[in-house]
Amino acid sequence: NMSTKDYVLNKLLGANGKAISGQDIADELEVSRTAIWKCVKELEEEGYSIESIRKKGYVLHDSPDVLHEAHITPYLKTEQYGRNLIILDEVESTQKIAHDEAQQEVPNGTLVIADSQTGGRGRLARTWYSAHGKGIWMSLIARPHLSIEQAPQLTLVTAVAIIQTLKEVTGLEAQIKWPNDILLNGKKITGILTELQADPDRIQAVIIGIGMNVNQQITDFEDEITSIATSLRIESGNKWERTEIIGELMNQLEKYVHMYEAHGFSPIKMLWESYSVTIGKQLTARMVNETLRGEAVGISENGLLQLKLRDGSIRSIYSADIEF
Ligand code: BT5
């Protein structure tokens, strides 16, 4: 039940720069050639650059950076992740929608994406700024074959998948700041928020929220974050297609979650430690009830930060804000 316009768009995208015949599409859909022409005009108004060549048909030269299924699917190499897409314009928070959807038994790998969020959130109900159209604001509904004790490490699994995605698509080498920040040149490019829906004995769903700054310029950031945040555009000097990054995030996330399910945390832990800026540093860890200072000596098999205090004792930390 695809609309005529979506059908035309899929044809244009699938033609890879070659001409497609308006008459052929009209015949396939049993509509008039004028109906096809109208769709082409609408697509042009949305920012698609389409050439009409007499007797040959339509050629797509350029697409706008819109979140459309037809732009994401060609990048997917997954079995399940990103195969069911819920794409929205403006929402309060994609986490909230994903939580509701997860209770409706949507399939593993369902992805909720929005162009903007009015109430995007981080840990402890902090604000996550989500400028319209400039970043990736998404929540993945995963139903992994893991025990509840294995769920917290999914934040670290996700961090590894994000690092690989950035390397693959942009060539940039990002770093991980425990527990849930991805940094480029010491500034935050991405935050991760992993939340669990579980019965007493099994995981129903893990909602993996990812916020990634893509095409913002420094002046786009709110005062509160100008000195701590960055974007792919700021770091590389280029604009990036959000849809390609979203597709690759799905590929890498499915790959690393599968790896975690099949082989446990050890292979992920090795990768994670190699990308981390935290390990080996003297730092202050602020938690809700206490603040500790010490040296980060590693992460444990269950994803906890191992902090060596001045008296030589080791403390395992589940979650904290870290300052170097
Ligand atoms: C996080 O929390 O870093 C997790 C952020 C997860 C956001 C995604 S977007 C899609 C999904 N839907 C949601 O509603 N959330 C998820 P935390 O470690 O608590 O960091 C929050 C702090 O990061 C804030 O207090 C700010 O200092 C900073 N911050 C806010 N917006 C930012 C941005 N766009 N870029 C960089 N830093 C930001």
Image (spheres, rainbow, N blue to C red):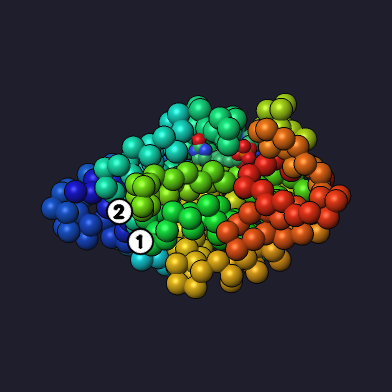
- Residues 180 and 38: in front is 180
Q: Is residue 165 above or below residue 200?
A: below
Where is residue 179 shown, x and y percent of the image?
64, 49
The C terminus lies in quadrant: top right
Residue at image coords 27%, 52%: 7
Q: Do we see residue 218 in this rendering?
A: no
Residue at image coords 59%, 70%: 266
Mark 1: few/some/many CA within 10 Å (<14, 14-19, 20+):
some
Where is residue 128 shown, x and y percent of the image?
58, 33
Quadrant of the image where one finds ligand 1: top right
Question: What residue does disc 2 label?
Answer: 107
| Disc 1 + disc 2, Cβ < 8 Å | yes
| Ligand 1 within 8 Å, label 1 CB | no
Where is residue 290 shown, x and y percent of the image?
72, 35
Outermost residue toward the right in this view: 310
What kind of residue is marked 1? Gln
Question: What residue does disc 1 label?
Answer: 80
Where is residue 130 shown, x and y percent of the image?
56, 34
Residue at disc 2, secondary structure: loop
What kind of residue is marked 2? Pro
Q: Do we see residue 203 in this rendering?
A: yes
Residue at image coords 36%, 52%: 201
